[in-house]
Every structure is written in structure tokens, then in C-alpha cells.
Amino acid sequence: MRHAIMVLGYGNDARVLQKVINYFDDSEIDFYIHWDLKYNLPKLKSYQSQIVFIPRIKVYWGTSTSVYAEQKLLKSVWNSKREYEYVHLISSTDIPLMTKQYFKEYFKKDLYLGFSPLNKKDSQRLSFYYPIDQLDIREHQKIIHFIKALNIMFHINRLKNHDIVPMKGPNWFSIRSIFLPIILDYNKMDIFKHSFLSDEMYIQTILGMYRPKQLKNDNEMAARYIDWQRGKPYIFNKKDVVELKQLVNTKYAFTRKVKDPTLIDEIFNNS
């Protein structure tokens, strides 16, 4: 069973990702990497895994550029013509919570994709028009509030003529490669253009027919361990090693967010 791990990378420190590559280095696990063009391209190495850097764009938090980068990764995996069974999306600050062998044997279902309960306000991420694709708005939330007010004032609804049910969940996932053509052939990609936080709606909206009737924790559905109670999200560190060791080889493939590359060694030492 072959796996393609797609990485949305950013920043000028790729030590965490290099540790992940070292840990998963295997002839059946390859890495496809999009590194934000605003930063220097890191030098990464492996012995058995193939590392593929794809053409880069500048990615701005909260904008549709995140969807474009993700789409480029999916296209690169599909166009590679390599026979992957599973495709995974992680960030460069994610680390595994499975041993390599357990990871290679764990995935049985078609989709490890999280869905959140339907919320009408979430649809505004797509229905409103956000001219923000080249803006760094993370520290300027007032801009978003102003844009939303304008959309309400002018009764903007870009979904009005589309038969679409917007859905939301974590943007990190593990899915069988058979879903790639469904995603890449989606003929309504214009709804993600000039959107806000649509990376959490992109795959869920396209694959909405696979949304389970009974929902559980959306990150658990995606096989991701993410803590939104202690942070946005919480950054795991060495004082959390005991907690993370207890989750090794359970139902979580990856955890985020991590800045300390030595955390992988701590977790898997005598785990």
C-alpha cells in the first residue's frame, strides 16, 4: 500500500518536517510539498521516500490561496501517475502519532475526513465576496467584519444560482486516491474564489455526499489530534509528551501543532 503525504509548508524553519520525513522514510511513502512562496525553499532529504516540490504560490491565511495551493498538491499527486492507495494532507508543523508500520496498515476506510454540524453562518465564507487574496489579514480582522457588513448591505449571495450545500470541517484529511478525480473534476470551483477560510470547506463541500449521518468529533473523523481548547490551536511541547505517548498507534495519524522537532523522538522513545 503506497501513501502520498501532501504538505502545506511555510516559514523559514523546516526542521519539524525533516523529522517527519526521517521518521516515515520508506519506499511506499512519498512526500509532495508546497512551500509558501513568501519563504525560502527548504532543503529536505530522504533515502527511500520520493520528495516532490511542486510549483509555488504565495499563500495568505484565510484566503482562497490556501485552496489553490491544496489543489496544486492534489493535481501533482494525480498527474504523477504513481499508484497511491491513500493521500494525506498535513502542514509542516504536524507530526505522526503512529509508528511507520502501524501507519501503513491502519487505513481501511475510504475517507478520513471531518465534518462539522451544518451552520448557516459558515456558508457566508463562500456566499460573500472577499477581495482579500493578496492580503495578510490575520492581524486585521476588522477588515473581515467590514467586508461582511458590505456583503450584507448589498445582499451578496454568490451561491444563489448554485445547487450547493456548503459543508465545513478540518482541512487536514486522509482519503483514498480514487477520490482525486472527483475533486479535481469539480466544475464549480469558482465558488471558492475570493472566499474566506474556504480551505475548511473545500473538500467537505465537494465530497458532501459522503458526510455520515451521525457525526462525532470532526478532528477524530479526520484521524487528527488537534486541541482547540488550550489554543488556536494549541502548540504541543515536551510537557505534553506523556499525553501524546498515550495516543500512539490509536486512531490519530497526526497531531498538530508542533514547533519542536525533537518531540517526535520523545514520543516514540520506548512508546
Image: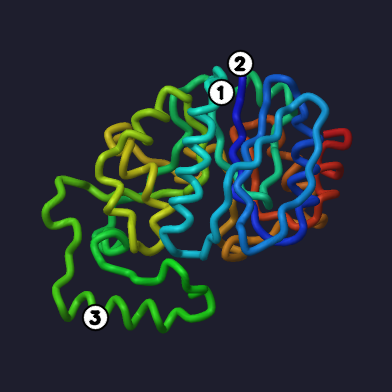
Q: How far from the left and from the top, in percent, is residue 196?
A: 38, 64
Going 74% across and 46% down the picture, which residue do you hit? 17
Q: Residues within 10 Å of mark 2 (few under 14, many from 20)?
A: few
Residue occupying image coordinates x 82% and y 36%: 268
Task: Tell which of 93 and 4 is nearer to you.
Answer: 4
- Dot 3 or dot 2, earlier in sequence: 2
Q: Which residue is mark 2?
A: 1
Q: Which mark is residue 151?
A: none
The answer for how far apart the CA atoms under marks 3 and 2 are is 50 Å
Quarter of the image that includes the N terminus? top right
Query: Is residue 28 positioned above or below 226 on the image?
Result: above
The residue that mark 3 highlights is: 150
Task: Pick the residue in front: 131 or 62.
Answer: 131
Element at badge 3? helix
Which color scheme does this rendered protein use? rainbow
Judged from the image, the secondary structure of the residue bearing numbered disc 2 is loop
Q: In the drawing, does residue 182 fall left or right of residue 170? A: left
Return the residue at label 1. 107
Mark 2 touches mark 1? (CB < 8 Å)? yes
